[in-house]
Amino acid sequence: MIDISKKYEKLKIKDQNKLYLFKNGNLYIFIGEDASNIQQYMVLKQIKFSNKYMKCGFPVDKLKDYQRVFNNLHLNVSIVDDVD
């Protein structure tokens, strides 16, 4: 959880316009502002990720379906499979 938060913060400094999608176990998740921003385009339930961030996401096996949606909506989503 902490590693994803730190990685998210570093990536957002580099490019605030991207939405970062993190692999977290059996899920892909958006956190922070990205979790809020994706709600403009699709309904994903948000829950608490840490004291600082909310998260929303979907199962890993649905990635291709969601990538199609991201592409159709011209969303700049970057997938982060390795948090280390």
Image (spheres, rainbow, N blue to C red):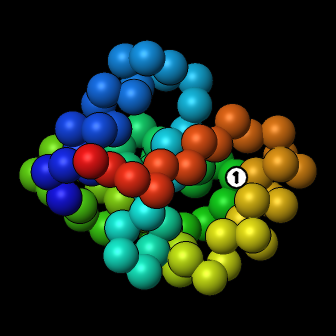
Residue 51 position in % (x across, y down): 10, 52
Q: Judge by depth and name the residue closer to the eye, 37 or 22.
A: 22
- Furthest-right residue in view? 72
Count all numbered tags in the image, as a single digit: 1
Question: Which residue: 42% across, 81% down?
Answer: 26
Give, as a three-letter code, the residue at label 1.
Tyr
Residue matched to label 1: 41
- On screen, residue 33 above or below 71: above
Q: Is residue 30 visible?
A: no
Element at label 1 = loop
Q: What is the quadrant of residue 69 in the picture?
A: bottom right
Residue 10 horizontal side relative to residue 76, left or right: left
Question: Which residue: 29% across, 38% down?
Answer: 7
- On screen, residue 64 above or below 14: below
- Furthest-left residue in view? 51
Residue 11 position in % (x across, y down): 39, 28
- On screen, residue 69 above or below 25: above
Residue 74 position in % (x across, y down): 82, 39
* Image quarter (top left, top right, bottom left or bottom right) of the N terminus: bottom left
Question: Which residue: 48% across, 66% down?
Answer: 28
Question: Which residue: 21% across, 38% down?
Answer: 6
- On screen, residue 12 above or below 82: above
Residue 20 horizontal side relative to residue 72, left or right: left
Q: Judge by depth and name the residue closer to the eye, 73 or 1.
A: 1
Q: Is residue 54 visible?
A: yes
- Furthest-top residue in view? 14
- Label 1, residues with CA under 10 Å away: few <14, some 14-19, many ≥20: few
Residue 27 position in % (x across, y down): 45, 74
Q: Judge by depth and name the residue closer to the eye, 9 or 46.
A: 9
